[in-house]
Amino acid sequence: MTNKTAAPATPTHATGSYFGSLWMVAATVCFTIMGVLVKLTAQKFALHEYELTFWRMGFATLVLGIHASATGKVFATRYPKEHFYRSVVGGVSVLMFFYGIAHLPLATAITFNYTSAIFLAILSVIILKQRPHPLTWFALILGFVGVALLLQPAIAASGTLPTFMGILGGAMAGYAYLQVRELSLLGEPSWRIVFYFSLVASVLAGIVATWRGWSVITWEILPYVLGIGLSALIAQLLMTHAYKVGRKFMVAALSYGTVVLSTLYGVFVLGEPLGALAMTGIALVVLSGVLAGLKG
């Protein structure tokens, strides 16, 4: 009789470590730093969102590519078409996200990006034919009410185009996450999914940035650009580790700390005022995401 060692189970709502879940707190700090640096770089040096996206994704491509080569990982995949579609959709969502950060109040842009959880739940119903739990339906309603409350102050403060880009970026991010799930079920390792996403997104951003025009990266700008790439990469690694060792729902709930930290920074440091309507909308979107994660 052969002894078989059981593979460790993937953490769920009820398994995993509470302490391990706290890695997500560090990830939210890094994600917030990334958002703040994108905002400051766009404002202080007038770098547009296309080149900012290129530097952010190019940094990840370079680091992940070098690490994969050094550790003997295989770049070849049996699903190039699936990777391409996921990467294009994800790349466009990052472009829209960075556009939102540059043109919307920081808290509003981050909140619109976090509507991806709402759109992921909707797309799971439409595409995967999943039957949502009643709590999920309640969460979706809350989320849409929150977005509706955010629309009026966002349009009044920043215009229709940035608001539309922010929401559409969240929707496309939700679809990209759905594609990540499908690739994972096909057996693709997470590093390869992230690598090809970063590679295609940087090429896409580079093409658009070339059309728009590049800024000269001076010694003054360089720390900001490197900071964007480094904080985003560290945040991604910390988040991945948190989902690996922590409790799934607790990690998902803690991820909304990015919205809270970005709101605090935007209001108290950047001086971006948020009225009661916008604050209520942000709170409802956060609550919606947490509730959707509970039964996700």
Image (cartoon, helix red, strand yellow):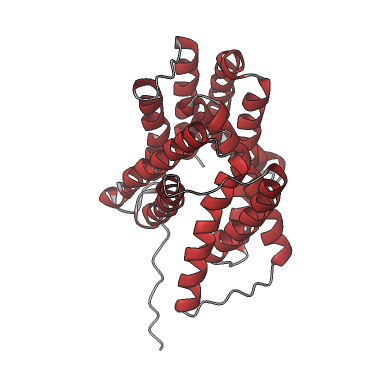
The residue furthest bottom is 1
Q: Nearer the viewer, residue 91 or 79?
A: 91
List x then y, in percent, for residue 202: 61, 55
The N terminus, quarter of image = bottom left
Above or below: residue 68 compared with residue 243: below
Q: Nearer the viewer, residue 256 or 132?
A: 256
Tell me if I can see residue 91 in this picture: yes
* Left or right side of 258 for 173: right
Above or below: residue 51 compared with residue 143: below
* Left or right side of 84 for 143: left
Tell me if I can see residue 134 in this picture: no
The quarter of the displayed image where residue 152 is located: top right
Q: Residue at x 35, y 41 (%)?
A: 29
List x then y, in percent, for residue 89: 68, 48
Above or below: residue 11 compared with residue 159: below
Q: Residue at x 65, y 31 (%)?
A: 165
The residue furthest top is 276
List x then y, in percent, for residue 186: 63, 65
Q: Nearer the viewer, residue 270 or 97?
A: 270
The quarter of the displayed image where residue 148 is located: top right
* Left or right side of 270 for 183: right
